[in-house]
Amino acid sequence: GAGVSQTPSNKVTEKGKYVELRCDPISGHTALYWYRQSLGQGPEFLIYFQGTGAADDSGLPNDRFFAVRPEGSVSTLKIQRTERGDSAMYLCASSLTAGALETQYFGPGTRLLVL
Amino acid sequence: GESVGLHLPTLSVQEGDNSIINCAYSNSASDYFIWYKQESGKGPQFIIDIRSNMDKRQGQRVTVLLNKTVKHLSLQIAATQPGDSAVYFCAENISGTYKYIFGTGTRLKVLA
């Protein structure tokens, strides 16, 4: 079946602009995760959804970052007043259910460049 | 596209040889581990997993070894192929949580 998809694959924006990154999880997966990956680093956790609710947003770096998942499927990561330091690969993953021992399957990522 | 991990440790192996990629994990409470493969410009791809009640698990051409005493994980790739060239990450799952912590990653280069 189809895997996790993310759009756009690349996004170039100017400092101070607003961006939205979209994630379509694997059909039937109730848990969804956002990660950020900087060059040369492993993915770092941002936020986790179980269904429609954000169960843990402790990884969001500040209040410019926000994510929603209104119908428990597609999720959007929103970044306000972008800064050059926000440039990174943003990865989405989903798992069948939430909790321990659940494999997370990743999408191809959105590479964000803030000029 | 831009490469993942320009400053990562690199392992270079000859095509057809076996590769061993190592990972030291951080939390003694971690009880589930995954190896991911990440090609340039793509998201991490699941390769193989292992639970803490095991010390070895084999897949197709890959074997994962877990040493809980020294908190060490390794990925062995048999008969390495050019398509194996990528960055490899280990990820540990903290017991009882959904959280994964990723290691720094190792770049595998397969020489023809």
Image: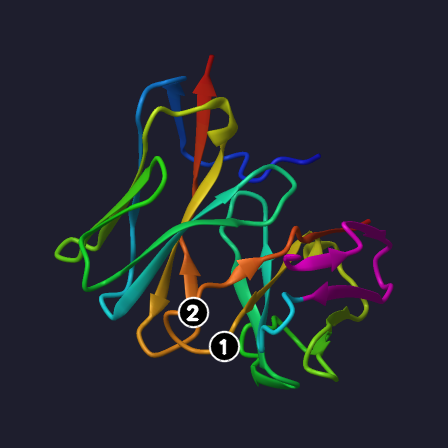
Q: Residues within 10 Å of mark 1 (few under 14, many from 20)?
A: some
- Chain under label 1? A
* Numbered tag placed on residue A27 in the rendering: none
Q: Is residue B72 magenta?
A: no
Please report the residue visible at 67 percent of the width from the left and 53 percent of the height from the top: A109
Foreground residue among A112 and A64: A112
* Percent of width and height locating residue A86: 70, 58
* Left or right: residue A96 compared with residue B62: right
User: Is A38 situated left or right of A69 in this image?
Assistant: left
The tag earlier along the polypeptide, 2 or 1, is 1
Residue B78 picture location, percent across and down: 32, 29
Q: How many marks?
A: 2
Q: What residue do we see at 61% from left, 84% from top?
A: A51
3D distance between C-alphas at marks 2 and 1: 7 Å
Under tag 1, what secondary structure? loop
Q: Evaluate if marks 2 and 1 touch, with contact meaning CB atoms under 8 Å apart.
A: yes
B103 up-or-down from A72: above or below: above
Q: Chain of mark 2?
A: A
Q: Residue at 63% of width from left, 44% of height from top?
A: B42
Q: Amino acid at mark 1?
A: Thr
Q: Which mark is residue A102?
A: 2
| Residue range highlighted in magenta | A1-24
Q: Which residue is mark 1?
A: A97
> Is label 2 in a helix, a strand or a loop?
loop
In the rendered image, which quarter contains the N terminus of chain A? Answer: bottom right
Q: How is the image coloured?
A: rainbow
- Residue A9 position, x and y percent, is 76, 50
Give above or below for B108 relative to A71: above
Indicate left or right for A19 with B4 as reference: right
The structure residue drawn at horizontal position 65% and vertical position 69%, both measured from the top left corner, is A27
